[in-house]
Amino acid sequence: MRVLFYHTIPVETYFQAWKKGDYPGHLLYGFTHFEKFGIKRVSFEIPFNPYKNRLKLMCYNLISILSMFNQFDAIYGATHRGLELVIFLRALGLFSKPIVIWHHTAVTNSSNKIRNIISSFFYRGIDKLFFFSQPLLDASLRTGKIKRKDAVLTHWGPDLAFYDSLLKQRKSKDFFISTGRENRDLITLVKAFSETKEMCEIYLGAKVGAVDYKSIFTMQLNDILKTNVRIHFVDMEDKEIALITNDAKAIVISTYDLPYTVGLTTLVEAMALGLPVITTDNMNYPIDVEVEKIGLKVPFGDINSWKKAIEYVAIHPKEAKTMGEAGRYLAERIYNLEHFSSEVASCLLSVSDNSV
């Protein structure tokens, strides 16, 4: 079976980096393991910034994919962004190859009837949808736009081999760390740490998407920043950030209340590194960190609860260590690259069989 893997990042560049041990494979959504399951990789590259002009992206993808039509048996997308025209062709019965997509949020209904009709038709063009968690899958089914047989729950998790190489270089230090690229509630986090004596290192881009984090800090947080909170505006590769994270005593994930698994990438990294985690209570996560005893949850925007959780981890190092070990064990058993790659491959092979 030949599968065209679609992503908005330079896939081949990161695939080569993964082979050298410089990039975590789970961010390529199973592409790294295709050959293990008898699937031939077909790369697809976008030669321009895919986030500046969506119409340009959709048209380029449609033309390119149609020109490659005889080179693949199915399309597998890490996102549907840019594949909309191809998916509509599939819904119309004018594109004969199966399309399998990761859906990062729940499928939703709109108050606009016309948009709902268009959206329902759009999802007819997707053969299978992967979801990160049961809550996202269940919410999607309630819309009536997708069928249960087409919704696939996976156990997306870290590339343990990648993180094992980092663990050998660990130099444990006395700081908490916050990383992540999107929708972080850093105001709550900074205010909470400013009421403790614990050190927090925050790594983020100066501007991520439409959010200008540097302006937020300059305008809203300068007056409350203390010396125990340090902010680093960086443009670093995943391995560089992971090496710094590896030395922390705990990972903190403070996010806004949004209807998807925001912060999940950071959570699975904490599990791989065997570090305890304090996270905003995101009901869309596939993992309840307190039930699994791998960390602590706090309500959205609750500064006092954040302060208590930070201080608990700081003064209970044995308990924190046990949380980290439980997270690593959970990753080894269920949530890891090997496991979810097998789930992805099984689904891709099944749609190939059904399309024959």
Image (cartoon, rainbow, N blue to C red):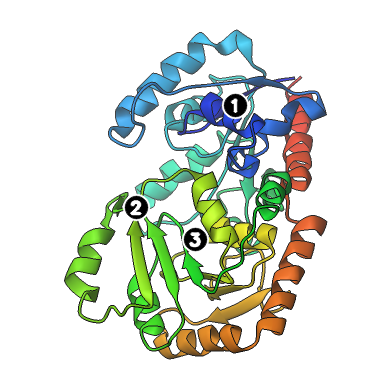
Query: Is residue 200 visible from the viewing direction of this image?
Result: yes
- Tell whether 67 sits left or right of 4: left
**Where residue 50 sits in the image (x, y, percent)?**
36, 32
Rounded to the nearest angstrom, the CA distance separating label 1 from label 3 is 27 Å
Residue at numbered disc 2: 205
Residue topped by disc 1: 16
User: Mark 3–mark 2 contact, CB under 8 Å?
Assistant: no
* Residue count near mark 3 (Cα–Cα under 10 Å), binned few <14, some 14–19, many ≥20: many
Depth check: give the residue in front, 276 or 334.
276
Q: Is residue 345 left or right of residue 74?
A: right
Q: Where is residue 101 in the image (x, y as percent from the top left)?
A: 58, 38
Drawn side of residue 257 relative to residue 316, left or right:
left
Residue type at tag 3 = Val
Farthest residue, direction left? 219
Name the residue at 46% across, 60% down.
Answer: 179
Where is mark 3, residue-wise? 262
Helix, strand or loop status at disc 2: loop
Find residue 279 and name its label: none
Instruction: Name the N-terminal-most of marks 1 and 3.
Output: 1
Q: Which of 21 and 127 is in front in this view?
A: 21
The image shows residue 185, relative to residue 297, as above or below, that is above
- Name the residue type under label 2: Gly
Q: Residue 106: in sight, yes or no?
A: no
Q: Which of marks 3 and 2 is nearer the N terminus?
A: 2
Q: Give the quadrant of the N terminus.
A: top right
Picture layout, residue 153 above or below residue 67: below
Mark 1: amino acid: Gln
Label 2 CA crowd tier, 10 Å (few <14, some 14–19, many 20+): some
